[in-house]
Image (tube, grey):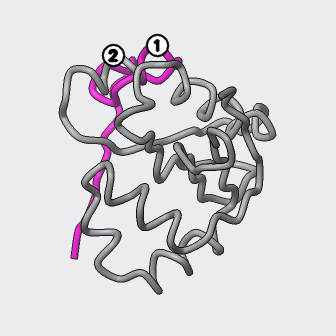
């Protein structure tokens, strides 16, 4: 089947939990109500579907004017490495081309660095002049 993309999609709770579970993001799935609320409060949610089945999701948060933050991007394991992540990221950010800051935080895996660099992102420590990034997890 052909992958279809849906900007501002509203996937069902069951679909979302299945996708987050499939990629091992159990911290999000522990509180389904909070995850559902987070998705509905997002700036944008763009999905990828294969024959109607949710196989990918990109979620943006921010003000949409000065900063857009890629909070989540996930692709079901059997659909990875097919360009769906690239398509989702490009489609999710498309309405925000004029926003100066596009930010994300991700795990320290070489494949992720390569993906985000291919998408035009630069790791904070590699910028000139250098920047600092801070995060707090409670």
Does residue 13 appear left or right of residue 22 in this picture? right
* Nearest the eye: 39 or 29: 29
Question: In the image, is residue 44 above or below residue 121?
Answer: below
Asked if marks 1 and 2 touch (Cβ < 8 Å), the reply is yes
Q: Where's residue 12, x and y in %?
A: 61, 70
Q: Residue 105 sits in which quadrant?
A: top left
Q: What residue range appears in magenta?
A: 116-138
Helix, strand or loop for disc 2: helix
* Nearest the eye: 32 or 103: 32
Does residue 33 appear left or right of residue 137 in this picture? right
Magenta stretch contains residue 129: yes
User: To which residue does mark 2 refer?
Assistant: 114
Q: Estimate how packed mark 1 is, as few (under 14), some (14 to 19) or many (20 or more) residues with alpha carbons within 10 Å.
A: few
Does residue 126 appear left or right of residue 49 in this picture? left
Task: Estimate the spatial distance between the alpha carbons at disc 1 and disc 2, rounded to whole Å.
Answer: 6 Å
Report the magenta stretch's main SS: loop
């Amino acid at each position: 089947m052909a992958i279809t993309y849906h900007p501002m999609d509203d996937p069902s709770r069951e679909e979302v939990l299945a996708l987050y579970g499939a990629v091992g993001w159990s911290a999000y799935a522990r509180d389904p109500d909070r995850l559902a609320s987070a998705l509905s409060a997002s700036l944008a949610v763009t999905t990828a579907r294969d024959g109607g089945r949710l196989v990918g999701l990109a979620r943006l948060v921010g003000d949409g004017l000065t900063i857009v933050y890629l909070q989540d991007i996930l692709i079901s394991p059997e659909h990875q490495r097919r360009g769906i992540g690239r398509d989702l990221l490009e489609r999710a950010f498309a309405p925000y081309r004029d926003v100066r800051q596009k930010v994300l935080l991700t795990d320290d895996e070489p494949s992720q660095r390569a993906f985000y660099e291919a998408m035009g992102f630069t790791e904070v420590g590699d910028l000139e002049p250098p920047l600092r990034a801070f995060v707090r997890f409670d």
